[in-house]
């Protein structure tokens, strides 16, 4: 059985989650809490296998709960209302989350990801720290971002990203050390996390770190400092030229 604790301060949301879990035969709900202090106490005493935890509690955040725990539990699914800063923070850390109101299908998919998990994640603490820092700094571009594929989780410095290339549901990250990372998310996902003016969407398939752009060639290609050329779409051409001219 998967011993599960629910950390949620809204009674209606909490009861809905309990209701949705009723058909999950391998889930055992071992308790719930609705505040930072009671959540930390529950987790320490019960040692649940899985935590379904609201990011924003009445007396603090989920991260305030985690600060009280040692070691920090790894198997956490965060729950949040639609809050752009909270969701962006979760995505920077590549953490698992559910949106309120919780959907049965999404909950089942989340539980299946937990069921298929086998190994410990050595990047977990760094992912949590990255999400927490992003949540407190709001619109600022983070120093690092988590890249998650089917088999690996990697934390890379944003400053090391040359450009991203979309390929359907996947994105290739090209780094300044010559390495290439494949991530199982579409380019649009990262356009939201790596926004202008720091990154330029020069083409439907390309997102480019502006710090590595040395110029534009025939209005058709961005030329990077390593001499690579990145295509510029016709409809973005004037925007890109004006943006680069304004920063000279």
Image (cartoon, rainbow, N blue to C red):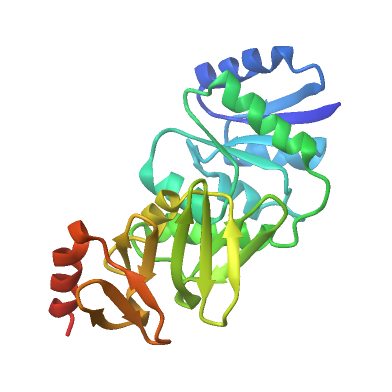
Taking depth in this image into account, of 247 and 164 the one nearest to the observer is 164
Q: Residue at x 75, y 18 (%)?
A: 24
Taking depth in this image into account, of 151 and 90 the one nearest to the observer is 151
Task: Give the vertical position of 140 relative to 177 (above or below).
Answer: above
| Quarter of image, res 209 | bottom left
The x and y percentages for residue 137 are 39, 61
Task: Give the vertical position of 106 relative to 147 (above or below).
Answer: above
Q: Residue at x 14, y 79 (%)?
A: 245
Left or right: residue 247 compared with residue 133: left
Quarter occupied by the C terminus? bottom left
Q: Residue at x 43, y 55 (%)?
A: 190
Quarter occupied by the N terminus? top right
Q: Residue furthest right?
A: 1
Task: Give the vertical position of 43 relative to 147 (above or below).
Answer: above
The x and y percentages for residue 166 are 46, 56
Left or right: residue 37 compared with residue 236: right
The x and y percentages for residue 204 are 34, 55
Taking depth in this image into account, of 2 and 72 the one nearest to the observer is 2
Left or right: residue 136 compared with residue 50: left
Q: Residue at x 62, y 26 (%)?
A: 107
């Amino acid at each position: 059985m998967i011993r599960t604790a629910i950390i949620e301060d809204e009674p209606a949301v909490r009861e809905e989650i309990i209701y949705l879990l009723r058909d999950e035969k391998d889930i055992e709900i071992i308790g719930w809490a609705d505040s930072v202090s009671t959540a930390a106490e529950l987790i320490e005493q019960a040692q649940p296998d899985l935590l379904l935890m609201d990011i924003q509690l009445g007396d603090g955040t989920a991260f305030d709960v985690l600060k009280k725990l040692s070691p920090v539990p790894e198997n956490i699914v965060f729950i949040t209302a639609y809050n752009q800063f909270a969701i962006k923070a979760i995505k920077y850390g590549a953490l698992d989350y559910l949106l309120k109101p919780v959907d049965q299908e999404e909950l089942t998919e989340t539980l299946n990801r937990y069921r298929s998990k086998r190994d410990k994640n050595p990047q977990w603490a760094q992912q949590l720290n990255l999400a927490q820092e992003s949540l407190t700094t709001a619109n600022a571009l983070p120093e690092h971002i988590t890249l998650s594929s089917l088999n690996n989780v990697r934390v890379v410095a944003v400053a090391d990203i040359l450009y991203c290339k979309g390929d359907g549901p996947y994105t290739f990250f090209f780094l300044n050390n010559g390495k290439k990372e494949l991530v199982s998310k579409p380019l649009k996902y990262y356009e939201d996390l790596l926004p202008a003016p720091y990154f330029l969407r020069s083409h439907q398939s390309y997102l480019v770190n502006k710090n590595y752009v040395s110029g534009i060639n025939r209005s058709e290609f961005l030329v990077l400092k390593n001499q690579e050329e990145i295509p510029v779409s016709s409809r973005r051409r004037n925007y890109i030229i004006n943006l680069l001219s304004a920063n000279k």
